[in-house]
Image: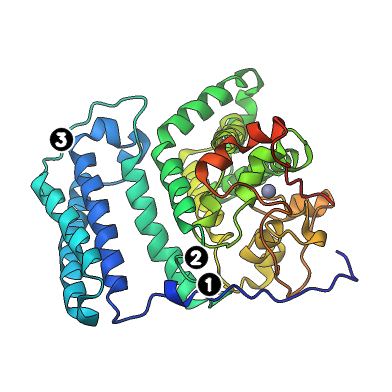
Amino acid sequence: METNYQYRERTPEPLPERELRLGEGRISGISSITLGILSVLAVLAYLYPSYLTTTELRQVYDGEQLQILLKYGIYFSILLGCLTFILNRGLYRHLGSFGIGFSLIALALGGYRVPVGSVEPRELSLGVDWLILAFLGSVVIFLTLEKLLPKYREQVIMRPEWDVDLFYFCFNHLAISAILIFSNYHASHFHWAISQDVQATIQSIPIWLQVALIILCADFVLYWEHRAYHEIKLLWPVHAVHHSVEHLDWLAGSRGHFVQVFSERAMVMIPLYLLGADEAALNAYVVFAALQAVLIHCNTRLPFGPLKYVFVTPQFHHWHHSSEKPAIDTNYSAHTVIFDRLFGTYHFPGEHWPAEYGTTKRLPRSVVGQTLYPVTVHLGRKDSGLPKQ
Ligand SMILES: [Zn+2]
């Protein structure tokens, strides 16, 4: 840690025109549209499950139970849409009209009455079910957390570039089966390293210990993969896309170049494949990793007490996203802070939080520009925005 560095308080720019206030009609309008779109997507997933649902996820949820959720989603979309006509003299009724429109389309397609039958599994499909469930879950858990315990109360939900990150969120979830196929294929190349004895020993230990072991092994791989993305000049422009986000919240962590998204999952699959832990331990790890990955980007001051010296927390990971000098190329770990401590890349300056987020040199602001960035930068058109100073 640099002792002479003058840490500053961050002050997000005020965006009063983007603030959502109760009684204005915008919250109901946006909720109506969101529920309407999700309802249409859900009905399509019920109509074409082998193309639009995920084989692994179908085993976890009950399609008939979720139809009840869909029913209320459609009803609430219509109800909230109607509310926009009443509130604020109907200023935002156009939002409500779209919401009601989407819900009517969902109903016309069969709504919550589409029969749930057996599904012919396809290897490659779009994870529409994963997208809907992850979106709803994230809003319920993380958006609520950000509203109850925000780090920056002034930061609005629709902060700059929220739409860019929503695109990445959708892509990452829709591509889930392609990511899994690629990751499993990649891990299968390490078949030679499997030891039946090691796997039998691991399966004989308690589940909680298996989970701890998976976390440590995955963290080790993710630490070095992440560090390579920062410190190998050729790789940085790919990872810089993730760092180009300048407002951290529950959606920000989704931003990432598809090469990074695929490679990260493929790398972490190697220890999972070699350890051969029980399914319960693997499932517990997947849930832990998925929740932590969103949480650490959240705009929250949720206190973690002494846990912050063991696990990666929002404050720790926010420092990883800082463009301030003492924080550059630090805090690589994904799960625990152990490997940053061990390998000398730990940065946690007490109660301070970053004042600046992003890269030292700005990347293109569009999805297309960011996707092409690793190519355009090597063609010499753009500076790589290398964070090292
Ligand atoms: Zn990074």
Residue under circle 3?
Answer: 117
In the image, residue 6 lies at what x, y percent?
A: 83, 74
How far from the left and from the top, in percent, is residue 153? 53, 78
Q: Give the farthest residue toward the right.
A: 4
Q: Indicate the secondary structure of the residue bearing disc 1.
A: loop
Precedes in sequence: disc 3 or disc 2? 3
Q: Where does the image place residue 287, in percent across and percent down from the top left?
A: 48, 50
Residue 109, above or below 39: above
What is the x, y in percent for residue 362? 67, 52
Q: Residue at x 21, y 60 (%)?
A: 99
Residue at 18 percent across and 32 percent down: it is 118
Instruction: Give the Cα separation between the discs numbered 3 and 1.
Output: 45 Å
Above/below status of 10 relative to 48: below
Model colouring: rainbow
The CA span between labels 3 and 2 is 41 Å
Q: Is residue 108 shown above or below 377?
A: below
Q: Tell me if I can see residue 71 in this picture.
A: no
Tell which tag, 3 or 1, sits nearer the viewer: 1
Q: How many marks?
A: 3
Mark 1 and mark 2 in contact? Answer it, CB < 8 Å.
Answer: yes
Residue shown at the point (50%, 74%) measured from the top left: 15
Residue receiving disc 2: 159
Q: Residue 273 sits in which quadrant?
A: top right
Q: Is disc 2 surrounded by few (<14), some (14 to 19) or many (20+) residues within 10 Å?
A: some
Residue type pointed to by label 1: Gln
Which of disc 1 and disc 3 is earlier in sequence?
3
Q: Is residue 106 above or below residue 277?
A: below
Task: Give the residue number, with chain letter if any, for mark 1.
Answer: 155
